[in-house]
């Protein structure tokens, strides 16, 4: 139990209706309790924590000074490397504090593998309550560690993991990539010639597998397609998912060029909007309550209307939404967008946030969604069993 915890480098603040205490390096534990007088502190993972600040904490000079003192305890070289991950900074720092020197070495040699070990409890089909012991003691060969994470336990796969670009390293994207390699082992050879696996490559392979030709994979791996939001790769994955929903007995086509892939995506989006056999039963209750500007999509017909208005393939998520594997929302401000959340460990997190025609949204829209998650939504996300 942390008590008031104001000294010894601990970060203490009031945020979103809770009193929170972060224990500094090398402890890296976080506790919170409601401000309603309850005396029970509960451990939690600060999902909005980043090396540069915690978006759930009020932006005040006092909190900023506390945060700088808190971060000064983390070795600067580790902090600099962890800052390159697009998310999960707290989880990686907490893992490094427990893994010791082998964890530091893995962060240098294969950062993608280090991230997945830090989030090992969330990479399975079912979330584990505790981190497996082998993930906290990464002494095994990297092929064995990859095998324990569900990847084929072979050296060529480890070489692929070393090629994953920092901006592409998110747990949902790596989970889909892993499942693609397991379903189609030939992908390992197909990807081996690429100098780098960026977000577009991972999204395309995770959603379409061998349907993406080597020629198109080479184009997607080029620097001009280094898009951390994976607009092209996500569109290919959406197209395949929509095709299988509309034509379950017809194999999807092969993707060989960007222009053809874009045309097929538009065609599938239109067909999904006109599909007549949508069920009317509501999806499971959304894991996070909506607001006036972030509205849950509760039925297949809601998805159809959203896809028609936004010119996207959101209706292809119908089966996943019905199984509770994804939650979808209509965002109306600061700009129009479609949001999807996926389960990730003990919480739900953003999978995609796209504007009309899958365009990238503004920084203001992304910040508004982050504030929502850090507020009432964030508390509900962190309490999902």
Image (cartoon, rainbow, N blue to C red):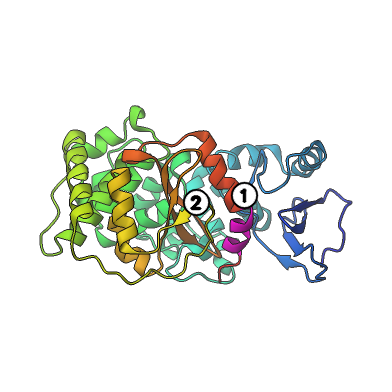
Report which residue position mark 2 lands on.
Answer: 294
Report which residue position mark 1 lands on.
Answer: 48
Q: Is residue 63 above or below residue 296?
A: above
Q: Secondary structure at mark 2?
A: strand
The crowding category of the residue bearing disc 1, from other C-alpha atoms within 10 Å (few below 14, some 14 to 19, many at least 20), is some
Task: For residue 159, say whether it is visible.
Answer: yes
Query: Is residue 4 found left or right of 207 in the rendered image?
Result: right
Closest to the observer, 367 or 131: 367
Closest to the observer, 375 or 173: 375
Q: Which residues, given as a range, are shown in magenta?
A: 374-382
Q: Position of residue 66 (x, y in %)?
A: 81, 42
Which corner quadrant of the image does residue 264 belong to? top left
Q: Is residue 327 magenta?
A: no
In the rendered image, the quadrant that contains the N terminus is bottom right
Q: Position of residue 243 (x, y in %)?
A: 18, 55
Q: Is residue 90 above or below residue 231?
A: below
Q: Is residue 112 above or below residue 119?
A: above
Question: Which residue appears at 58% of the width and 67% of the height?
Answer: 131
Task: For residue 206, say whether it is visible.
Answer: no
Query: Is residue 365 found left or right of 254 in the rendered image?
Result: right
Question: Which residue appears at 75% of the width and 56% of the height?
Answer: 27
The outermost residue toward the front is 292
The outermost residue toward the left is 250
Closest to the observer, 168 or 194: 168
Closest to the observer, 75 or 356: 356
Query: Is residue 357 found left or right of 378 in the rendered image?
Result: left
Q: Position of residue 68 (x, y in %)?
A: 77, 38
Inter-mark Cα distance, 2 to 1: 19 Å
Q: Secondary structure at mark 1?
A: loop
In the rendered image, the quadrant that contains the C terminus is bottom right
Closer to the observer: label 2 or label 1?
Answer: 2
Question: Which residue appears at 75% of the width and 62% of the height?
Answer: 32
């Amino acid at each position: 139990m942390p008590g008031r915890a104001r000294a010894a480098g601990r970060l203490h603040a009031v945020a979103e209706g809770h009193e929170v205490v972060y224990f500094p390096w090398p402890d890296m534990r976080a506790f919170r309790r409601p401000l309603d007088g309850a005396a029970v502190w509960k451990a939690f993972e600060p999902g909005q924590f980043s090396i540069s600040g915690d978006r759930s904490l009020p932006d005040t000079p006092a909190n900023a000074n506390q945060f700088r003192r808190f971060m000064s305890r983390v070795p600067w070289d580790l902090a600099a490397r962890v800052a390159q991950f697009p998310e999960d900074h707290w989880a990686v720092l907490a893992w490094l504090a427990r893994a010791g020197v082998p964890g530091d070495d893995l962060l240098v040699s294969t950062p993608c593998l280090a991230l997945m070990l830090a989030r090992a409890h969330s990479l399975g089909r079912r979330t584990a309550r505790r981190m497996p012991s082998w993930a906290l003691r990464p002494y095994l060969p990297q092929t064995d560690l990859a095998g324990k994470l569900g990847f084929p336990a072979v050296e060529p796969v480890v070489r692929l993991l070393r090629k994953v670009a920092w901006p592409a390293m998110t747990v949902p994207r790596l989970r889909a990539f892993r499942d693609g390699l397991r379903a189609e082992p030939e992908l390992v050879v197909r990807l081996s010639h690429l100098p780098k696996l960026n977000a577009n490559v991972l999204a395309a392979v995770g959603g379409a597998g061998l349907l993406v030709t080597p020629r198109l994979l080479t184009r997607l791996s080029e620097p001009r397609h280094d898009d951390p939001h994976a607009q092209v790769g996500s569109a290919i994955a959406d197209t395949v998912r929509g095709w299988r929903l509309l034509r379950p007995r017809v194999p999807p086509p092969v993707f060989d060029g960007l222009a053809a892939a874009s045309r097929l995506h538009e065609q599938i989006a239109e067909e999904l909007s006109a599909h007549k056999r949508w069920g009317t039963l509501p999806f499971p209750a959304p894991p996070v309550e909506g607001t006036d500007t972030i509205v849950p999509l509760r039925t297949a017909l809601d998805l159809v209307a959203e896809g028609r208005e936004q010119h996207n393939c959101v209706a292809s998520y119908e089966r996943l939404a019905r199984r509770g594997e994804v939650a979808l929302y209509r965002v109306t401000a600061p700009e129009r967008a479609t949001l999807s959340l996926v389960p990730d460990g003990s919480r739900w997190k953003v999978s995609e946030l796209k504007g009309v025609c899958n365009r990238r949204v503004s920084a203001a829209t992304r910040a508004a969604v982050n504030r929502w998650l850090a507020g009432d939504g964030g508390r509900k996300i962190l309490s999902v069993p």
